[in-house]
Amino acid sequence: MDRETYESIYPKLEDLKSVESLSLRYGVPKPTLRVLLTQKIIRETTRKHGVMKKDAKKFRRAWDHGDSFLKISRGVGFPPVMVASIILVENGVSRNMFRTYLKSPNSIKDKRLKKEISEAVENDLVYSPNGAFEQLKRGRDIEKKIFDWLSSQGISFMTEEDCRRENHTKTPDFLLDEPVTFKGKDVCWVESKATFGDYKEFKNDFKKQLRHYVKLFGPGAVVYWYGFLKEQGEPNILFLSRSDIKDLDNN
């Protein structure tokens, strides 16, 4: 995706309805926009969480006066499951009990609480049990696709689990036994990301993981399955997407 398109889309991503409309307007696949929306929600939640916790008493008073978790959530622009957590913990509910509520809303005896927890879960794309499961499953499924594809090309490698058994402290998803040439560059390792590689995502990934892989194992590739910003560059890291990996030249 080019920078101009990204900067037009990102501020407009607000919910699943915006995913539909923006996909039609810009011709970007809905799965890509859905993933980018998830990333945006996580970033905004992380940024605002401390402020929201400070307002816990105010949120609880609003809830005590009849406002639902969902209404409060929409009023402050914060995920409904997170709002429910802040209010209920402030009200004396343990975090373990809250997790039980999320997993089994129908087991809640209080009718109002049951209804509102169910609403929060249904309307939370990221922090509901289904949202968390979807993110985990997406990551595993994409890693499996890259595993199968590398294997089908006859490329031998160690997985992250294999690397850990070899006592490597920083471990990419796939450490190749021999470098392969891809788009004129040597690739010694491949990292799988079930995300869209915008500036913030790559900056975070580079700081936490990718720079260490380069230092330990040499140049490599990161597969941002849902695409990446074309203007980005890093001399020892090749950016790939799902459409690129079929072209790998093993020589």
Image (cartoon, rainbow, N blue to C red):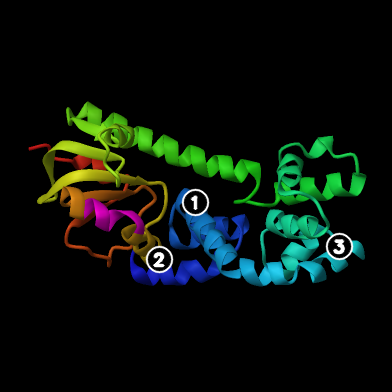
SS at mark 1 in the image: helix
Secondary structure, mark 2, is helix
> Tag 3: residue type?
Trp
Instruction: Reply above or below: 28 against 170.
Output: below
Q: Based on the displayed image, in which of its 4 quarters is residue 51 positioned?
A: bottom right
Q: Position of residue 143 (x, y in %)?
A: 37, 37
- Comes first in the chain, label 2 or label 3: 3
Splitting the image into 4 quarters, where does residue 248 fall?
A: top left
Q: Which residue is more in the foreground, 220 or 182? A: 220
Q: CA distance from mark 3 to mark 1?
A: 35 Å
Image position, residue 21 (x, y; %)? 56, 60
Residue 63 tag number: 3
Instruction: Kindly report the distance in space between the C-alpha atoms of the residues bearing marks 1 and 2.
Output: 21 Å
Query: Residue 160 sits in which quadrant?
Result: top left
Q: Amino acid at mark 2?
A: Lys
Residue 66 appears anywhere in the view: no
Question: In the image, what residue occupies the spot 18% across and 47% down?
Answer: 217
- Decide: few, some or many residues near mark 2? Use Cα within 10 Å; few <14, some 14-19, many ≥20: few
How dense is the environment of label 1, judged by Cα within 10 Å: few (below 14), some, or many (20 and up)? Answer: some
| Of pointers 1 and 2, the one earlier in the residue sequence | 1
Q: Is residue 51 above or below residue 66?
A: below
Q: Is residue 65 magenta?
A: no
